[in-house]
């Protein structure tokens, strides 16, 4: 079911411009079936950030979390970052921020920290898709969970003939903020419920996933594949 989806979904879900796509994306205890990341600045910045790919890919989970917070905030002080991570300021600087600075991942401006040039290639939008042949309740539960890591979360199901069941699926999706994509018998795909954008306090894992995305997309055999075709929304 995933193969036909990857061919048709970019035109539905990805704004015009460069994007990255990956299947079976691991994130903690979950594996997301398909993810898309719109990268409007990719063409201008991917060459510049290539030297950072190896440094980003070597980060531990804890390091990725701290770096993602700096990236998300744009500019943040050690004191504020300490409150967000529950790490003492001295330890935060000695074990995380100063090593990041030495490797060029962050820049220091007096008391504030910001990410380096690699951060200009940030994804504008992450979209997650869970594909299921039958178990729509599980799909909705996973779709709701994916709102913690993606701006927009969709489930993809084969076209449902039963009117009551179809209405139940759409009503449940709307209540959860999850979008629904129908895979029709002829192979076409259609959005029947639009996803609601996840608010920042819900979509809290986006930036950590984005760090790994950039590192992986720059590898020769990475999970994330960069696509430079222009797609219509």
Image (spheres, rainbow, N blue to C red):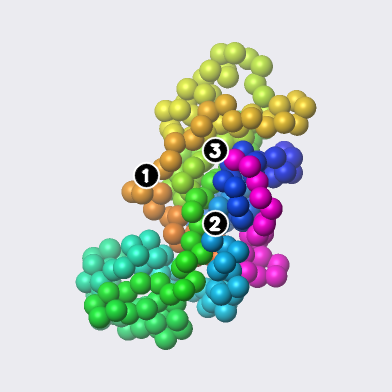
**Residue 25: quarter of image:** bottom right
**Closer to the camera in the image, 34 or 12:** 12
Question: Of helix, strand and loop, which mostly describes the magenta segment?
Answer: loop
The quarter of the rendered structure image containing the C terminus is top right
The quarter of the rendered structure image containing the N terminus is top right
Q: Residue furthest bottom?
A: 102
Q: Pointer 3 and pointer 2: residues touching (CB < 8 Å)?
A: no
Crowd tier of the residue under label 3, counting other residues whose Cα lies within 10 Å: few below 14, some 14–19, many 20 or above: many
**Magenta extent:** 217-233
Total labels drawn: 3
Q: Pointer 3 and pointer 1: residues touching (CB < 8 Å)?
A: no
Residue tagged by mark 2? 40
Crowd tier of the residue under label 1, counting other residues whose Cα lies within 10 Å: few below 14, some 14–19, many 20 or above: few
Residue tagged by mark 3? 154
Residue tagged by mark 1? 199
Q: Is residue 220 magenta?
A: yes
**Mark 3 or mark 2: which comes first in sequence?**
2
**Mark 2 or mark 1: which comes first in sequence?**
2
Please state the horizontal and vertical placement of residue 82, each as a whole percent of the image.
Answer: 25, 70
């Amino acid at each position: 079911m995933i193969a036909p989806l990857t061919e048709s979904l970019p035109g539905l879900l990805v704004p015009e411009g460069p994007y990255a796509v990956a299947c079976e994306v691991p994130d903690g205890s979950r594996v997301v079936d398909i993810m898309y990341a719109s990268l409007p600045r990719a063409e201008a910045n991917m060459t510049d950030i290539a030297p950072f790919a190896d440094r980003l890919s070597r980060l531990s989970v804890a390091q990725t979390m701290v770096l993602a917070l700096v990236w998300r905030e744009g500019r943040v002080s050690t004191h504020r970052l300490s409150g967000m991570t529950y790490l003492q300021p001295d330890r935060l600087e000695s074990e995380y921020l100063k090593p990041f600075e030495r490797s060029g991942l962050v820049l220091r401006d007096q008391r504030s920290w910001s990410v380096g040039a690699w951060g200009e290639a940030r994804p504008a939008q992450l979209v997650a898709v869970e594909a299921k042949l039958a178990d729509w309740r599980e799909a909705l539960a996973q779709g709701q969970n994916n709102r913690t890591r993606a701006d927009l979360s969709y489930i993809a199901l084969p076209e449902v003939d039963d009117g009551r069941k179809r209405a139940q699926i759409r009503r449940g999706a709307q209540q959860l903020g999850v979008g629904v994509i129908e895979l029709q018998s002829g192979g076409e795909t259609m959005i029947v419920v639009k996803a609601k954008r996840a608010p920042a306090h819900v979509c809290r894992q986006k930036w950590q996933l984005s760090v790994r995305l950039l590192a992986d997309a720059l590898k020769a055999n990475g999970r994330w594949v960069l696509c430079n075709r222009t797609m219509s929304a």
